[in-house]
């Protein structure tokens, strides 16, 4: 429940866009990033794939990472 998948894109050391699994869509932080986010949010299959990354990356590895830390 407490796991969140975040993928950010940067340009010139500034965050352009971010996908957050808790929000469920892309958010743009620059003028160009807002345009990218709007285009990516229109594509339902791409959004579904991004949402699935939480299970693929996070939920499959959380127990392994947790055990390694302890």
Image (spheres, rainbow, N blue to C red):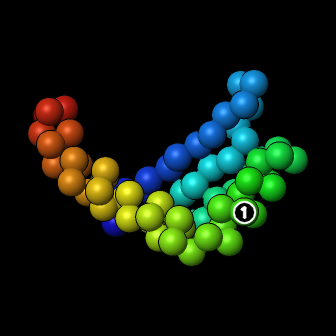
Secondary structure under tag 1 reads helix
Residue 12, above or below 4: above
Q: Quadrant of the N terminus?
A: bottom left
Q: Position of residue 19 (x, y in %)?
A: 58, 55
Q: How many marks?
A: 1
Q: Position of residue 35 (x, y in %)?
A: 81, 55
Nearer to me, 42 or 4? 42
For the point 57% across and 75% down, which residue is it?
44
Quarter of the figure with residue 26: bottom right
Disc 1 target residue: 39
Is residue 32 shown left or right of residue 5?
A: right
Say whether residue 5 is visible.
Answer: yes
Nearer to me, 57 or 1? 57
Residue 7, above or below 44: above
Q: Position of residue 58 (x, y in %)?
A: 31, 52
Query: Which residue appears farthest toward the top when viewing the image?
Result: 12
Query: Which residue appears farthest toward the right when viewing the image?
Result: 31
Classify mark 1: residues with Cα within 10 Å, few (<14), some (14-19) or many (20+).
few
Say whether residue 22 is visible.
Answer: no
Q: Quadrant of the C terminus?
A: top left
Q: Position of residue 21 (x, y in %)?
A: 49, 62
Nearer to me, 2 or 61? 61
Is residue 4 shown left or right of residue 11?
A: left
For the point 65% across and 62% down, which residue is it?
40
Is residue 29 shown left or right of residue 23?
A: right
For the point 72% across and 41% down, which residue is it?
16
For the point 38% across and 65% down, which residue is it?
52
Residue 8, above or below 20: above
């Amino acid at each position: 429940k407490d796991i969140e998948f975040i993928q950010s894109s940067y340009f010139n050391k500034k965050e352009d866009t971010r996908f957050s699994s808790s929000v469920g869509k892309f958010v743009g932080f620059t003028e160009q990033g807002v345009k990218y986010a709007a285009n990516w949010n229109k594509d339902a299959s791409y959004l579904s794939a991004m949402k699935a990354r939480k299970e693929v990356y996070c939920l499959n590895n959380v127990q392994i990472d947790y055990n390694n830390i302890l």
